[in-house]
Image: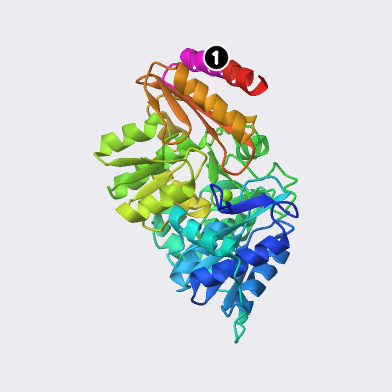
Amino acid sequence: MGKLFGTNGIRGVFGKELTLELALKVSYALAIYYNDKPILVGYDGRHSNTVLSRVVRAGLNAMGIDTFDAGLIPTPCLQYATRELGYKGGVMITASHNPPEYNGIKVMADDGVEISREEEAKVEDIYFKNDFQYAKIIGNDAKEDRAVETYINGIESLVDVNSIKRREFTVVLDLGNGAQAITAPRLLRELGCKVITINEEINGLFPGRGSEPTPDNLQELSDTVKANNADLGIAYDGDGDRSMFCDENGTIYPGDRSGAVLLEHVLSKDKGIIVTPINSSIIIDKIAEKFGCKIIKTKVGSVEVSRKMLEVSAIAGLEENGGFMYGKHIAVRDGAMSSALMLEALLKGRYSELLSKLPKYYSYKTKFPCTKEQSSRVIEYLIKETDGKVETLDGAKIWIDDNTWIMVRQSGTEPIMRLYAESDDKGKLDTIVKEYTDKIKGIINS
Ligand code: MG
């Protein structure tokens, strides 16, 4: 049987891997899978989004399913609204942080969270059986305009709005031409912040700094924070589920640092189980230890984390890429929820101060263009040549010592191999990164 779903839903280059024909057939399969109505459909700011949304809704309607069009919203807004407004499922047209030529279809259950890997296999089964008949009564398509308000109210219900308002924080938002432009500025203004925005125009070509915020492409955010003496800078990815934070001095920290600060804050309010992928920082283990909370590791991929969170009723989930999930809100990554929690954390001290209290670790992350076949060879070789401890839950995570590791895995969304490494010793980190980069390049080019 073929494969439709990658790490994060059905994703590919629009017009090549992801055609309108494929989207239509996927929607037929989803109609049979959901076998219920109504379904909420939303999309982010990519150019191919409205055509894909129309095709998906038409396909569902043809099979007798009613649809509601939530319009252009961030992914977590669609997810939250799906659950809160009582939909039987949600479909989001998005390729998240991928380059502009990509698009994708994310499939949510009635709890607003992406369907599990097992449920994805059911949809694939229906899709590849290819036995579709139109319904006798065609479904209806209508507008849903309550999603944004429902989402913002939900976030505000979980933070101390009055205390945040009293502080009158100045916050710079780098919206990255993405979908949080619809919701984040409004949320922060309602929280009493003076909001300065950059890259606020929604544009599927992501002309500002690209659709994926990383410490390397947020110079404008850093400069704007400094120029305005702002308390905080925040950057979102294309569909607004991931967030990166910048301190009051203009320093951008990787997602595992902001995640650690958010985790400390959340656990200081309520203790509970934490779920995080295997490539997360040792800092997260240390924080869990400090609060006496259990930590569960999963494969890389937000679906794995989200589904595990629901299974164990976790309080928080987090990814090293700036994806933070608050169990009390919804078990999905949410840039706006993370922003509100960060402002609440700032009531205790400046962001740089909160960061300085974290255990000291150095991390590194890079990627190599790489086919699946090449990455299998790399992973196989690295596992074979290591005599230390290796974890193979996802790719290969090699422990050099108790406080140093390096990990490689093939991306589920792009033809690249990702490398992650961490150590409490900067010199050691640089040495192993160089050593493994040379090895990996050697194998890829052999
Ligand atoms: Mg995203």
> Residue at image x 58%, y 75%?
68
Rendered-image quadrant of the C terminus = top right
Q: Position of residue 392 (x, y in %)?
A: 42, 32
Q: Amino acid at mark 1?
A: Glu
| Category of crowding for the residue at label 1, using alpha-carbon neighbours closer than 10 angstroms: few (below 14), some (14–19), many (at least 20) | few
Q: Image height check: is 19 above or below 143?
A: above
Can the viewer see residue 114? Answer: no
> Residue at image x 54%, y 45%?
243
Q: Image height check: is 365 above or below 194?
A: above
Left or right of 51: which side holds 188?
A: left
Q: Image height check: is 123 above or below 296?
A: below
Q: Image height check: is 228 above or below 149?
A: above
What residue span does the magenta drawing correspond to? 423-436
- Tag 1 secondary structure: helix
Residue 383 is drawn in which quadrant?
A: top left
Q: Position of residue 217 (x, y in %)?
A: 66, 35
39 or 233, which lies in front?
39
120 or 133, which lies in front?
133
42 or 349, which lies in front?
42
Q: Position of residue 188 (x, y in %)?
A: 53, 56
User: What residue is disc 1 on?
Assistant: 435
* Number of disc labels: 1
